[in-house]
Image: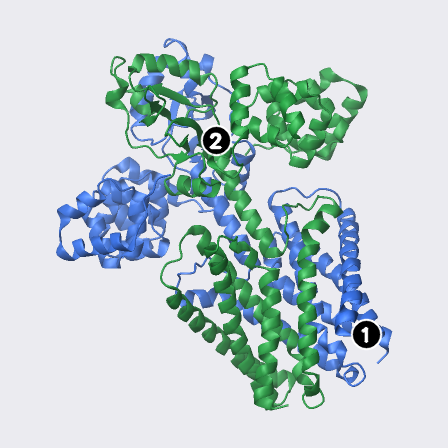
Chain colours: A green, B blue
Amino acid sequence: MMSFEVTTRYIDEIQQLIADGNNEAILKLLEEVHYADIAEIIEDLTVEEGIYLIKLLDSDVTADVITELDEDTREKILGGLSSKEIAEEISELDTDDAADIISELTDQQQEEVISHIEDEEHAKDIRDLLRYDENSAGGLMAKELIKVNENWNVLTCVKEMRAQAEEVSRVHSIYVVDDNDLLKGRLSLKDLLTTSTRTAIKDVFIKKVDFVHVDDKAEDVARIMQKYDLEAIPVVDKAGRLVGRITIDDIIDVIKDEAEKDYQMAAGISQDVEADDTIWELTRARLPWLILALFGGFVSVSILGGFSNAMTKYPSLFFFTPLIAAMAGNVGVQSSAIILQGLANDSLKGSWWKRLIKEISLSLLNGLVLAALLMSAGMYFLGFDIKVGLTVAVSLVSVIIIASIIGTFVPIILDKRGIDPALATGPFITTSNDIFGILIYFWIAKIILGF
Amino acid sequence: MMSFEVTTRYIDEIQQLIADGNNEAILKLLEEVHYADIAEIIEDLTVEEGIYLIKLLDSDVTADVITELDEDTREKILGGLSSKEIAEEISELDTDDAADIISELTDQQQEEVISHIEDEEHAKDIRDLLRYDENSAGGLMAKELIKVNENWNVLTCVKEMRAQAEEVSRVHSIYVVDDNDLLKGRLSLKDLLTTSTRTAIKDVFIKKVDFVHVDDKAEDVARIMQKYDLEAIPVVDKAGRLVGRITIDDIIDVIKDEAEKDYQMAAGISQDVEADDTIWELTRARLPWLILALFGGFVSVSILGGFSNAMTKYPSLFFFTPLIAAMAGNVGVQSSAIILQGLANDSLKGSWWKRLIKEISLSLLNGLVLAALLMSAGMYFLGFDIKVGLTVAVSLVSVIIIASIIGTFVPIILDKRGIDPALATGPFITTSNDIFGILIYFWIAKIILGF
């Protein structure tokens, strides 16, 4: 394993060198360091020191460093560079990374930066990419790709490829187009290596080629590339013209972002925050869900208040409300998590009825086991009377069934209506299940105990 | 976007054709269908029908189909094939996929299947891979790779590569070794395309090459490949000999599995289950966490029971227990989720003290906002008396602070001790925070109200 690690001593050393203005030593120290590691170093420096490094190092390194930075840090670092300096960095990047970074700038700065890019083709490509939604295939794709005309022969093709390969960092596939730039197929490197140079491309290329449209959703592109084990996929416009390609490393980011988003939603965090964000950012992400939970809590307070006449006769009923609420919440979260993953993997099969019956059977089974445990262990250790015990046990089973039905079907319904089903996990489900749980519990208590 | 979709009608048609034994029509129907789609079709058929298809179709397709199946389905399908038939499928696969499938068989069957593989080299490679832990670099890697000797020239290299490329489905990198098979560097395809054929490999290869050791953990390999944007990474043994390579598609599976595992842990699901698993499997995954929550509930019942003397004077105190418990649970889950992601991304910086102070400030801020809301909205709508309101408000702030400290530091401590910090999310945190929350609430009530 490569053992580069950013140690405190290392950071101290760099800070000292920057303070001394010892550029030669800095350049020597960072000469062999990977851009991803330099980005990590910059995260540990002050903004001024970071800007100093970016200005000092060669832009073919720093361009990559800038793409690797956290968005917050990048914003600050770019804030210390002129539009011309930013343009120099951008010029070193592939169009997709360039467009991603430029899209984070203000509209006015975007124009300024692009106008400073010397390579007009590159500037045009970037401008083109900025038009697409960042969550679409167009927003993910890069303009850099290797394409050959079906009317060429292998020799021309290899010559052209060499020229094109200068611009393309990784050759995944060679795409074949006709005279109108319409995507016709692909060519494998292997075939190129093993075919005579005078063979016409027409005769060797593979006609079956997977592709996506510029407007396809990023998550659909991710699903397809994973399902079909693709390392790159060409992107066509509405007319079928080849306009770009998406590589698997961009898809990894989509997959990770999706997973993080779902995870944060389930935990009641509404924005993409990290432990090291400011208190203000963290509060904005967390407080809304807590307010939701607080108002949910108000509802349960009033429900309990409404049943206060039961308190004199059956005080112990009230001791069980947190238990009932917790069980409802846990069951709901479990059910919603399982359904959400099924929706994400597109693996939910069978009818609603079947799912309902299964969910009821499952929660009946779990509920009965838990109720038995409650009756035996609970009555033995806690010594409450049999009527209250029975009430709690019956409620527990009912609450578990209802909670699992809510947890299962709310996400499904949201998904059908085009709303992100991840909303219906975490605090939303626990809060509503708390309320339903307590309500059901006291209704059943009222029926059984008759207060 | 490719529009292949497995419809009910399509499945019906295939089932009818299988029932009729109309092999010709089946072959024609599935001729152009991707193996990943055939796998999806088989998931919708009965096991017998699936086995029928696997036996009917060509093994260069079905081998890939088998790798794409769900583990459960695969087990059933392979159960219907003889060891010799399984060996035929396995022979078509790359060593890493082959080893993955064989590792799912019983020890005895493993030996039988491997002994039926005709290509002895392939059999030896698979046997070799089976020795590694599936969560290590060795467990992820494939033996198929393109390697050239540093002492060759470009011409020999291209010739050898052509021979090797037959076996390697995707050429990512060409690895350079010395006479002892020690990894020396890599060669880019681009350089090969643009260098004279008589140049010595020694003079053109890139000496800097990232690699991992066979025993490195899968998640570390994933982290490195992502950080350094690698599409493939060579694997060396203890002596530094090149023994395999890992490609990015295997890493995607690692990333997804990690994310799913964390998500399921946070939701209180202890095994990798899906919505369509059996009730028994789902119960095994869910019930243990619910039992944990139930026993947590018992604790809160006894705590509340211990404060029952407060009931006559301050009955409304008991109406707030679900609210306090819910807030404690939600805050704890938020904090633990943020820390868990920080631990996963290795992005937690700064000292414990700083983190503690930050967590306290953050929860104090959130707590005060929520307490203010509670006092104003709560007293207005719910009309409880000022002393109880103040008690609840003070408790709320305290409970939120304690809950966020527990949520933050329990995962950190677990992680330091080498225990999976994901354990300390979801039900574990909500249950313990319920208990602490209620305890703190009644202690504070006792101090303020003096019952």
- Residue A325 appearing in the image: yes
Q: Secondary structure at mark 1?
A: helix
Query: Does dot 2 land on a helix, a strand or a loop?
Result: loop
Q: Residue at x 67, y 75 (%)?
A: B299
Going by the numbered disc 2, the residue's amino acid type is Met
The quarter in which the N terminus of chain B is drawn is: top left
Mark 2 belongs to which subunit? A
Residue under mark 1: which chain is it in? B
Residue B206 x, y percent position in the rendering: 49, 19
From the viewer's side, name the closer residue of A288 and A17.
Answer: A288
User: What residue lies at 51% left-to-right and 59% top-to-bottom?
Assistant: A337
Q: Position of residue B70 (x, y in %)?
A: 36, 53
In the image, residue A389 sits, relative to residue A180, either above or below, namely below
Q: Amino acid at mark 1?
A: Val
Q: Which residue is under mark 1?
A: B388
Residue assigned mark 2: A141
The percent position of residue B180, horizontal first and vertical second, equals 42, 25
Residue B166 falls in image quadrant? top left
Q: What residue is drawn where x is 55% and y is 25%?
A: A127
Q: 10 Å neighbourhood of mark 1: few (<14), some, or many (≥20)?
A: some
Q: State whether residue A451 is above or below residue B201.
A: below
**Residue A298 lies in quadrant:** bottom right
Choose between B414 and A112: the one closer to the eye: A112
Say yes or no: labels 1 and 2 on the same chain: no
Residue at left offset 23%, top offset 43%: B59
Q: x, y (%) of residue A246?
A: 45, 32
Label 1 – label 2 distance at C-alpha: 59 Å
Query: In the rendered structure, are the residues bearing label 1 and label 2 in contact, judged by CB atoms less than 8 Å apart?
Result: no
